[in-house]
Amino acid sequence: MELFTNLYKQDLFDSLGIGVVGLGLLLVRILSFLHFAPVFSHKSIPSHFRIGFSMFLTALLNFKLAQQTIPETGFSMIYAIMANIILGFIMGFTANLLFVTVTAAGEMMDMAMGFSSAQMFDPSLGSQTTIMGKFLGMLSIVIFFSIGGPEMLITGLSNSIDSFSIFNPSINFNVDKIIHLCGDIISMGFILVSPIVLTILVNDLVLGLISRASPQINAFQISFTIKPCLGIITWILILPLFFTCVANFFSSASRLF
């Protein structure tokens, strides 16, 4: 009987209202994050699955709401919704940059090996992509799952609730951290592509010297045959190092959050 009596107490309804608002704001952040996060944002993932999985994560992380402090002066609902959308977008887009870097490295490899003319349309990206770019993109997804990448994303999303309040999130941009992060991503792309690019560069220098010493040899035409073979052989030799390099790159992605 006391349970039904407590249902009509004003403080219970007030706390219930705050709890519903908190769940709604948390759902907004998770939806925005999954819409741009790697793997989950792929076009092969149905929208209703993302919505259902977002609701599941909201129910799973609802205990975090009890640790949130409500501002004494109140909060603007429109500001809180927009701030959570922007925060989820920033986290998802930044994590997705890791895959974009690997795909871009594959496209640079294709350009060096002469495969850039063999392009295909990628429905998931909505644009043209090259052979190695598509292959490395799919390979990076396999490596991402092998190191527990989805669990890392969910852990980072949970940690963001502690760092940025649900009700009144204040986003402070650390310019130095953003600059170092962009530098690490760019350097990672060069590390992945540098063995093949340097090998092709040495091949071009050798063919240039041969053409200079013996003008009768058409080095330009020979390069069309040598470059793809040399690039593929180099790629097979560095493949174990590629797995290690990409796995370490994805494992250090927790600092993004």
Image (cartoon, rainbow, N blue to C red):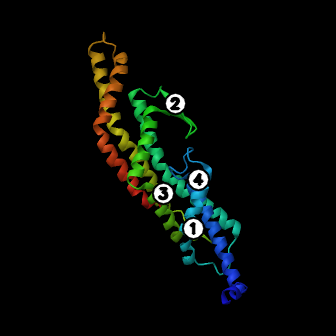
Q: In the figure, is residue 91 to the left or right of 151?
A: right
Q: What element carries label 4?
A: helix
Could you say which is closer to the camera, residue 115 or residue 40?
40
Q: Name the residue under label 1.
A: 59
Q: Where is residue 76 in the image (x, y as percent from the top left)?
A: 70, 71
In 3D space, how far apart are the residues under numbered discs 3 and 1 (Cα atoms)?
32 Å
- Residue 127's place in the image compared with 143, above or below, is above
Q: Mark 2 points at which residue?
A: 120
Could you say which is closer to the camera, residue 62 or residue 91?
62
Figure quadrant of residue 32: bottom right
- Residue 203's place in the image compared with 30, above or below, is above
In 3D space, how far apart are the residues under numbered discs 4 and 3 (Cα atoms)?
32 Å
Q: Mark 4 points at which residue?
A: 49
Please, what is the three-letter code of the amino acid marked with disc 3? Answer: Ile
- Tell me which numbered mark, 2 or 4, is placed earlier along the sequence: 4
Rate crowding at label 3 as few (under 14), some (14 to 19) or many (20 or more) other CA atoms within 10 Å.
few
For marks 2 and 4, give the one nearer the viewer: 4
Report the residue at 42% width, 50% height from top.
144
- Tell me which numbered mark, 1 or 2, is placed earlier along the sequence: 1
For marks 4 and 3, give the one nearer the viewer: 4
- Circles 3 and 2 in contact, beta carbons < 8 Å: no
Q: Position of residue 169 (x, y in %)?
A: 59, 69
Q: Mark 3 points at which residue?
A: 178
For marks 1 and 2, give the one nearer the viewer: 1
Q: From this viewpoint, is residue 200 visible?
A: no
Q: In the figure, is residue 238 to the left or right of 96?
A: left
Q: Residue furthest top?
A: 216
- Tell me which numbered mark, 4 or 3, is placed earlier along the sequence: 4
